[in-house]
Image: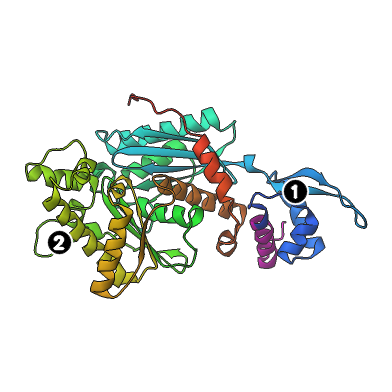
Amino acid sequence: MADTSLPRLSNRSTVLAALLSGHEMDRQQLIRDTGLSRATVFRIVDDLMSGQLVHERRRIFREGRGRNSTAVGFNGRSAVVCGVDLGGTHCRVLVSDALGRPLIRSRDATPRQLSAEELARWVSERISGLVRDHGAGIPLHAVTIGLPGAVADDSRTVVGSHNLGQIQGTAFIEEVSRLLRVPTIIANDSNLALLGERQYGSLPESETAVLLSMGTGLGVAISINGQILTGAGGLLGEFGRLRLPGRAHRLRDLISGAGLAAYARDRGITVESTSSLFADREKYGALLREVDEAMNHLVSIVALAYEPQTVVLTGGFSDSFTTEALHRISDEVAATVGVRSVIKKSDLGDSAGLLGAMASSLSRLYTSFGVSPEHLASIDVDREQILSQLECCAIDEPKERKV
């Protein structure tokens, strides 16, 4: 019987975390980096090699004293994982290897007219097709789907979704899980975008940060002491539901693409896109002043609630705010509530949620390998390589996809 004592499990987790950086190293370097004994490192590496999680790589030749050795590296082809960013307008899918190196990503118009079961079938077929065509025969092990709505802490129930109402409840995720037959979880898309910014962007791990996801809808995510906050009912951070002071309208009616478009139509203003409004401030000045007031109100709320060092904006609607406008909002909020935050646009743009979903799937995969939560946080991600490969692995967007 295998020894599964806590010290042995911890030692295995330590070695795995060191190798999951993707760097090749010999056993002597592993001994130095992990602080474990020679016998322990050699035993764990041999065990990982027998399980095909680690392979021998290049020979390392040393000058002078000391024997030559062979580098070992984690086997990125041991599994593939998938991250999905299912939005009210587009659905993005990313398939990566076990080291998080992107293999393929796609972007399609979300078929919003489908029922929960039909949408689940469409998403599942898209994932399965990409894995089949670009996964080199490597089995899919984990999937995370970011959704535009409140998700309960069981990661199985959508509490509410303003822009994809059919995904509420459990029918959507149950059907996706049944069809894919691998561990599949759902999460709020804003929370995953913040995870992506922390993992692959420039946000320090321990910094208190708030992310405003401003696309078709409005979402808010909060990170404190390296942890993304969630609530049992999935409603924590759903500030878009708040009514504007003295009005029946909600924050999301002015600070989201779909909300502002509908708000403008109600006032007899018809434009091709909300960006057209911001492009002509002289003509639409009164309406845009309302948007600015709503934005100040939202940032003031999160500033008082969390005192964030940074507020990150992502989503297509955030492109409407210039750098000068963000500086002005920061100044006005500081003058009003006494909290100054750096307000900036996302480093990752629309890829933040997709990368966060991939990171979530990788965490689930690594946990199944035996990596502890403590060691998960210590894995040295090769951000530059991953972002470079992400740019190179996009497939052409189909003009129309049958459903």
Residue at image mark 2 = 244
| Residue 400 left/right relative to 239 | right
Q: Residues within 10 Å of mark 2 (few under 14, many from 20)?
A: some
* Disc ID at residue 72: 1
Front residue of 331/362: it is 331
Res 10 seen here: yes
Q: Which residue is at the front of the view, 183 or 162? A: 162
Classify mark 2: helix, strand or loop.
loop
Residue 11 magenta-drawn? Answer: yes
Q: Are marks 2 and 1 in contact (CB under 8 Å)?
A: no
Horizontal placement of 297 versus 355: left or right?
A: left
Residue occupying the point 93% across, 58% down: 65
Q: Which residues are magenta?
A: 1-17
Left or right of 396 in this view: 13: right
- What residue sits 16% from the left and 37% below the top? 271
Quarter of the C terminus within the rendering: top left
| Location of residue 175 by image quarter | top left
In this orientation, does residue 96 appear?
Answer: no
Query: What is the spatial separation of the Cα atoms under label 2 and label 1, in whole angstroms?
Result: 58 Å
> Is the N terminus in the top left, top right, bottom left or bottom right quadrant?
bottom right
Q: Nearer the viewer, mark 2 or mark 1?
A: 2
Q: Give the number of the disc on residue 302.
A: none
Report the magenta stretch's main SS: helix
Q: Which amino acid type is marked by label 2?
A: Leu
Which x, y percent locates residue 254?
18, 52
User: SS class of the residue under badge 1?
Assistant: strand
- Would you say 146 lies left or right of 304 here? right
| Picture coordinates of residue 299, whole percent (x, y) | 27, 64
The correct choice, above or below, for 350 with respect to 155 in the image is above
- Residue 231 drawn at (x, y percent): 34, 63
Q: Label 1 is placed on what type of residue?
A: Val
